[in-house]
Amino acid sequence: MNKTQETKKLGLWMSTSLVIGNMIGAGVFLMPAALAAYGGISILGWLASSAGTLVLAMVFSKLSKLLVNKSGGPYAYTRAGFGDFAGFLVAWGYWISVWLGIAIIAIAFVSALSVFFPLLGENPIAGVITGLGAIWFLTWVNTKGVRESGKIQVLTTVLKLTPLVMIIVGGFFFFDINNFIPFNVSESTDFEAIAITSTMTLYAFLGFESATIPADNVKNPGKTIPRATMLGTIITTLVYVLGTVAVMGMVPLDELEVSPAPFADAMGVMTGEFGRYLVAGGAAIAAFGALNGWILVVGQLPRATAKDKLFPRIFKKENKQGVPVYGMLIASALASVVMLMNYTEGLVEQFRFLVLLGTLSALIPYLFTAASYVSILLEKKLPSQPWLGIYGMGSLAFSYSLWAVFGAGEEAVFWGFILLMIGIPFYVFVKWRNKG
């Protein structure tokens, strides 16, 4: 690898920004309102989902050290642990979940912008054009190379974190402890309330594995990826938990529960109307940054799979900048179709279902990766890895992932299984085409 090629790769801060940017989307700005029905006990739900995610992040970090330069994240780890077929199923489901997610984030971006431009919420055509414009502009940016995408990711991450950090720091000067009394305002038991809120919040952590996917486009991946994964996950966890505490401490629960923009209301308490627009801008930037990060990922994972002859060859074709441009274009086209569904009245219900299905498809790889971690370490028989530690961390990561799948609901689990089964004929076809 020559020096010029190395300078085109993602460093620690770009990789960390990819993790933070893909995790913190526009949706987190609404989370305190969703949790208000349970009161302060929802903070314990955040902590429970945070703990589970940190264990998973540790598993991914350790695997990135064991399998250096293996691009594809959960796909690469699953294939190493269980072979081609399991690896393909993970890649298939994860790839679908990513381009579904791109469509979802594009819609969130348009929604956030509608605060400044009400026409976007009133005129479906204007909304569609704006959403499609964002998808294809960032697709074009990503075709210029991972460094170009990385620069945008760093910038948008700083901009999206700014209003959140302002609320966390400034909010405690307007804090009212009485907003947390009683601690559990729901009719559920304390255990039920914690379980429900941990399920609600765990979806906000999807994306912590982002740095592991473009491994061959990361400088010194054996050190950079695990550091970026843990650093990004820890920073995001602190922002989520402290941000929710600050907002709940500033806005009474009865107002918070019906608030369409809880962080904006909290900022309004601190700075007035200007603060509301600042937070709305932060939500739009959050969505834009997440969109950029996931478009980068959506080309990298199928490229790694295609290199192993488990996806069609077109997905591994690269342009002069070393970007898997065709895979990116295919995914952006599919995301555009899904986004259009949201603006067709008869298909809105189907779109909501696809959101749930896409989330589940992203969770399944966590299950496989947790199990692969145990399988790979036992196979390698590393003397420095005690069996209790291997099984302990692997079991915790697997249990948390299973809990996350359970929280998706039986309908999503059923159709998620069907989705994976649909991939089997595709796997057989690709294997046949690559025979010999």
Image (spheres, rainbow, N blue to C red):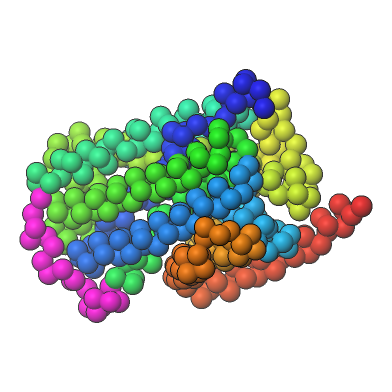
Residue drawn at (21%, 38%) of the image: 166
Q: Pick out the residue farthest to the top.
A: 4
Q: Position of residue 290 (x, y in %)?
A: 46, 42
In the rendering, at what x and y percent does residue 387 appear? 52, 68
The answer to if 189 sits in the magenta stretch is: yes
Q: Is 156 within the magenta?
A: no
From this viewpoint, is residue 339 visible?
no
Q: Disc count in the image?
A: 0
Residue 143 on image: x %, y %: 63, 30
Q: Residue 290, relative to residue 380: is it above or below?
A: above
Q: Residue at x 17, y 61 (%)?
A: 253
Q: Which quadrant is the N terminus positioned in?
A: top right
* Residue drawn at x 11%, y 60% as measured from the top left: 179
* Residue found 14% across the figure and 36% down from its top: 271
Horizontal arrangement in the rendering, residue 237 relative to residue 220 (left or right): left
In the image: residue 157, left or right of residue 18:
left
**Where on the picture, by quarter, is residue 19?**
top left
Viewer-proximal residue among 399 and 98: 399
Looking at the image, which residue sits at the far front? Answer: 383
Relative to 214, does residue 372 appear above or below in the rendering? below
Q: Nearer the viewer, residue 406 or 5?
A: 5
Residues 37 and 340: in front is 37
Camera-side residue: 381 or 45?
A: 381
- Does residue 17 show up? yes
Query: Range of the magenta residues?
Result: 175-193
Residue 44 screen position, x and y as percent:
26, 65
Q: Is residue 436 left or right of residue 197?
A: right
- Horizontal arrangement in the rendering, residue 143 relative to residue 193 (left or right): right
